[in-house]
């Protein structure tokens, strides 16, 4: 080091210590925060998602009516922008006189609960299989690739329909079913990433230092996969919400009178030509939630691993 | 001076002190294109390598890329299982030594400092990891140990919370060295520790390795393709070609008076500092042979300028005299016909 830079270095540094640079490059976390603040897609998606989550959590406080209360004297009331709409029922009422806004708020709970927990179950199954296959290779991997292929060959909607028609559409059964039907994406991605990482020298170093396979998987491999797992989970959650809506629409998901968005579309079907708002409002809710989750997931990927993107 | 390189079976060192590391006829065969219906084509990456490394010495293994150096280092680190032959650590067969015990004696420094550090861990976490694996000391003692070793390898203390992506190549290689040394091993296996670095940084890392060796009484197995680095670092040199050791001996002998035509070609390939001289004439002819389909006879004969007729058919014997080894018909005086 030249005497010039010695003169610039702060007095706190003891002489004799090695300090090539006095300013440190911003840490990866600081850079990540910087990218997150300027990512419009992430901000919109995350705010929208946060809004839905807050509404779902505080539905009992926010909802103007009981979502199950029927009022046969006020059936099929138009929403506030309709010809006979009033501010009493902002989104109108359905064929049984229930308030659509209240049902929508309670429905958000069901969509989010099923979407989140099923995505977590799928993530646990898929990531475990993917990491084990990618890490151990050989016969373990052949078996796991076989499982993935079998899973990919299954028609998701068909299986979901038949199993939920047997199980009777209870929510826990639905969650487990959807978790077991969508783990393949996690497995495919984590397996190939683990395979690449397996050959990297930091894994070799850890092995040479005497680390157990469990330690290497948990401490070296898993932290490197976490971002990708979160991104897949967001896509998976959106997919699960759509499947749940489809199942409920077909009458094989959530049972009436529970307020599921898919079920609301299904119930509005009978009068869709006269009161199209009954399918448009829950349809728009599904659309907005799914797009919010996808935007947030894309944003997380851009923000956490910008290196792999153009 | 006892032999650095011996033919199998090697006698134990006369002084009674066991060899730090020894291999006997070590062979590693890979199967390429293995499917459930075929066992694949054999590829012998390491073929009958017998080496011995005494405490405090530096043995360099030289050869061009693809000759099996890295496979040899992974075998000696216990990261891959040999197909045949044995490895001894301090006189004990590796198969009898617990992996954790072994790791406290032998540690690696790898070639690529960009791939050898986990990008999600801080420098402090990376260096502390071996201490945690072996449950050495309390948390405070581990911290002190990490700081001491960082200072020793020339890393500023404030880097302890940095991530590898914030460090230069030379700093990363210092981290890799610190991680290897933190559990105080006896032997360091350096697999091309400087080939991914700038020339100016290379010298710093080599000097660091030299001074650490003196301070901590380390034994190095030093793998390189760069003969000028080898000349600077090592006591003994073994030249590897297509999985076999073709010439070995004390560094001064092998590098000053090379006998095997391959060693001579390697030496003539050293680039000089004078750009006016152009690229040196190496006389190696065609490219590296296909290791899946090695030549008959001497494996080097298709590229050898001095090849005899029998080189194409007869495999040369391994001739050992004192601390020197050679595998070449040109130097096989016993078979004169």
Image (cartoon, coloured by chain):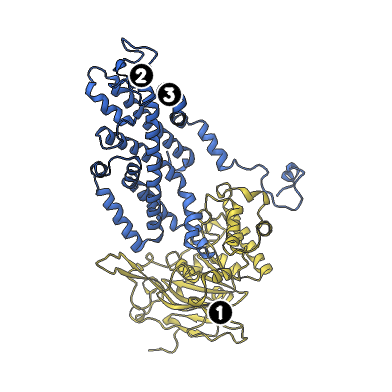
Q: Secondary structure at mark 1?
A: loop
- The hue of chain A in the figure is blue
Q: Nearer the viewer, residue A171 or B159?
A: A171
Determine if residue A294 is in view.
no
Q: Is residue A32 left or right of residue A291?
A: right
Q: Looking at the image, which residue is at 46% across and 38% down?
A: A300
Q: Nearer the viewer, residue A145 or B13?
A: A145
Residue pointed to by mark 1 = B4
From the viewer's perspective, is the residue at label 2 or at label 1 nearer?
Answer: 2
Same subunit, labels 3 and 1: the answer reads: no
Please state the chain letter of the residue tagged with numbered disc 1 in the rendered image: B
Q: How far, Cα to Cα, is label 3 from label 1?
A: 84 Å
Q: Does the CB distance between marks 2 and 1 fall below 8 Å?
A: no
From the viewer's perspective, is the residue at label 3 or at label 2 nearer?
Answer: 3
- The hue of chain B in the figure is yellow
How many marks do you count on the picture?
3
Q: Looking at the image, which residue is at 40% across and 33% down?
A: A109
- Picture coordinates of residue A98, whole percent (x, y): 33, 22
Residue pointed to by mark 3 = A63
Residue pointed to by mark 2 = A91
- Picture coordinates of residue A288, whole percent (x, y): 37, 28
Q: Secondary structure at mark 3?
A: loop
Picture quarter containing residue A28? top right
Q: How far, Cα to Cα, is label 2 from label 1?
A: 88 Å
Q: Does the CB distance between marks 3 and 1 fall below 8 Å?
A: no
């Amino acid at each position: 080091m030249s005497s010039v830079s010695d003169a610039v270095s702060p007095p706190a540094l003891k002489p004799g210590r090695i300090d090539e640079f006095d300013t440190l490059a911003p840490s990866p976390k600081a850079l990540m925060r910087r990218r997150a603040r300027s990512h419009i897609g992430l901000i919109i998606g995350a705010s929208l998602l946060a809004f839905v989550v807050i509404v779902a959590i505080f539905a009992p406080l926010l909802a103007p009516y009981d979502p199950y209360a029927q009022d046969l004297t006020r059936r099929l009331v138009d929403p506030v922008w309709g010809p006979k709409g009033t501010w009493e029922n902002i989104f109108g009422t359905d064929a049984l006189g229930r308030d659509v806004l209240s049902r929508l708020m309670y429905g958000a709970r069901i969509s989010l609960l099923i979407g989140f927990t099923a995505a977590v179950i799928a993530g646990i199954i898929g990531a475990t299989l993917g990491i084990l296959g990618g890490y151990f290779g050989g016969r373990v991997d052949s078996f796991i690739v076989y499982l993935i292929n079998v899973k990919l060959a299954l028609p998701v909607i068909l299986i979901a329909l038949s199993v939920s028609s047997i199980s009777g559409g209870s929510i826990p059964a639905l969650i487990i079913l959807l978790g077991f039907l969508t783990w393949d994406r996690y497995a495919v991605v984590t397996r190939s990433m683990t395979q690449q990482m397996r050959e990297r020298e930091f894994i070799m170093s850890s092995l040479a230092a005497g680390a157990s396979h469990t330690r290497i998987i948990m401490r070296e491999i898993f932290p490197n996969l976490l971002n990708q797992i979160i991104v897949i989970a967001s896509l998976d959650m959106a997919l699960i919400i759509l499947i749940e809506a489809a199942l409920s629409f077909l009458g094989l998901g959530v049972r009436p009178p529970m307020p599921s968005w898919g079920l609301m579309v299904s119930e509005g079907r009978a009068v869709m030509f006269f009161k199209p708002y009954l399918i448009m409002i829950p349809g728009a809710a599904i659309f907005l939630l799914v797009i919010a989750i996808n935007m947030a997931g894309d944003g997380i990927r851009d923000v956490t691993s910008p290196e792999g993107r153009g | 001076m006892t032999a650095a390189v011996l033919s199998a079976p090697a006698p134990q060192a006369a002084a009674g002190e066991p060899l730090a590391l020894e291999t006997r006829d070590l062979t590693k065969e890979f199967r390429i294109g293995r499917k459930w219906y075929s066992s694949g084509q054999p590829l012998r990456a390491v073929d009958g390598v017998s080496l011995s490394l005494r405490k405090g010495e530096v043995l360099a293994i030289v050869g061009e890329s693809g000759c099996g150096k890295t496979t040899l280092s992974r075998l000696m680190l216990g990261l891959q299982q040999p197909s045949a032959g044995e490895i001894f650590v301090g006189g004990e067969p590796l198969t009898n030594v617990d992996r954790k015990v072994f790791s406290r004696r032998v540690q690696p420094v790898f070639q690529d400092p960009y791939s050898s550090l986990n990008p999600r861990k801080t420098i402090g976490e990376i260096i502390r990891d071996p201490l945690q694996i072996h449950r050495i000391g309390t948390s405070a003692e581990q911290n002190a140990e990490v700081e001491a070793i960082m200072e020793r390898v020339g890393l500023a203390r404030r880097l302890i919370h940095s991530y590898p992506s914030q460090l230069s190549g030379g700093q990363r290689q210092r981290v890799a060295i610190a991680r290897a040394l933190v559990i105080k091993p006896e032997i360091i296996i350096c697999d091309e520790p400087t080939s991914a670095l700038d020339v100016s940084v290379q010298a710093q890392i080599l000097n660091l390795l030299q001074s650490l060796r003196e301070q901590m009484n380390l034994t190095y197995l030093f793998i390189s393709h760069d003969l000028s680095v080898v000349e600077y670092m090592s006591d003994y040199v073994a030249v590897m070609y297509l999985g076999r050791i073709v010439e070995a001996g004390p560094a001064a002998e092998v590098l000053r008076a090379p006998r095997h035509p391959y060693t001579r070609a390697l030496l003539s390939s050293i680039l000089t500092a004078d750009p006016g001289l152009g690229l040196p004439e190496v006389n190696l002819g065609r490219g590296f042979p296909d290791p899946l389909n090695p030549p008959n006879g001497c494996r080097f004969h298709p590229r050898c300028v001095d090849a005899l007729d029998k080189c194409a058919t007869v495999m040369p014997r391994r001739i050992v005299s004192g601390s020197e080894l050679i595998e070449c018909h040109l130097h096989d005086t016993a078979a004169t016909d």
